[in-house]
Amino acid sequence: MKNAFFSAAFLCFSLTFLGQTANADETIPAWVNNPYEVCSEEQFCATGFGEGLSLARSDARAGIGKIFETKVRSSFSSSLSQENGEVKSADRDVVFEESDVLLTAVEIKETYESPAGVYALAVLNKPLAASLLQDEISKLDEKMEILLSDKEPASVKKAERLYEKRQTLNQRYIILTGHPALEVVSYEDIFKAKKAAGTKRDIYLVFKGEQDPAVEDAVKSVFIDNGYALVQTPSEQARSVVFSMKSKKVPLSVDKFEKYIFYFSMTSAQNSKNQKEAQILSTSIEAIELSEEQALITALEEFEVYLQDHLDDFNF
């Protein structure tokens, strides 16, 4: 009986010891703490971590993006839950990356699951990314040449914005290759074209709806940046433009955060005496922040970009 007892005890001890030995032998991959342990000189690498596979991959890609100042943001719409490594919820927390040509060249090479969570290794192939950037830069060069040949103020302004975008891509290209992409259109070309194009017609700008100095300043700035002259009094020569903004708070099941929808619209008449107005812009932007003031700042930043992109489409 004693022999049977000691045999059973020895067997349990042996199984426990073997289990501990197996856990000890399960080493953490080197790339978890140092991603460049497994990366070549032609690669950029980053390690990401998350409660599930989806968040770990997103975090790893964000690590690559940070090298090029790629913005990665999280939009909170409700509580977050995890199911088999996927982000699940009726009103889920959506984690997304802003569109960027470089992120298309990022590959998740390895993953590792630990008791604390999941690790992911993201790898960016430098030659492939440089080739993609060169293609994008070449497209911008072609567009700028066409716009500058038009010689209209609106076209020159569009070319200037494309040049600024090209500069950003070129900085990333330098990081990848060590040298800049050859310039087809220079800033001197843009500057000369702006002087030759002159300014557009006068605009009499009126603000209605909810009043906010920051919104008014932002809208005025976009018009001025696009070559319009803002006048203080109405006249037959000045185009009349009415800008309006309204906001609405909507329910949100996330503690401490508030969600707002901002409605922006613009109408225009041929001049101050022409009372027939036509709507030329109508859009809404959602923002989730800690307060309405912060939400407006976020929405206004997005609206400024929207207005810049569409202002030249209006027949002023």
Image (tube, helix red, strand yellow):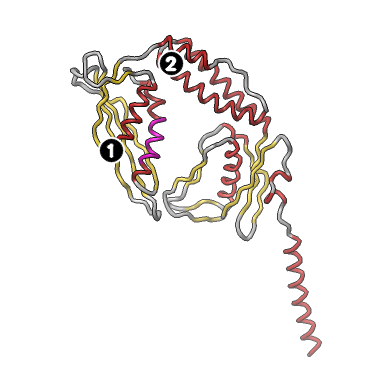
Q: Secondary structure at mark 1?
A: strand
Q: Secondary structure at mark 2?
A: helix
Quadrant for residue 195, please give it. Answer: top left
Badge 2 or badge 1: first in the primary sequence: 2
How many numbered markers are drawn? 2
Q: Find disc 1 in the rendering and name its residue.
A: 246
Q: Main secondary structure of the magenta part?
A: helix
Answer above or below: position of 183 versus 28: above
Q: Amino acid at mark 2?
A: Ser
Residue ID at (24%, 20%): 269
Quadrant for residue 26, please give it. Answer: bottom right
Q: Amino acid at mark 1?
A: Lys
**In 3D space, how far apart are the residues under numbered discs 2 and 1 (Cα atoms)?**
31 Å
Mark 1, Cα crowd under 10 Å, few <14 / some 14-19 / many 20+, is: some
Q: Find disc 2 in the rendering and name its residue.
A: 155
Quadrant position of the C terminus in the picture: top left
Residue ID at (39%, 51%): 257
Q: Which residues are magenta?
A: 296-305
Image coordinates for residue 242, horizontal then vertical, percent: 25, 27
Image coordinates for residue 246, horizontal then vertical, percent: 28, 38
Image coordinates for residue 80, horizontal then vertical, percent: 47, 54
Quadrant for residue 132, please give it. Answer: top right
Quadrant position of the N terminus in the picture: bottom right
Q: Nearer the viewer, residue 191 or 253?
A: 191
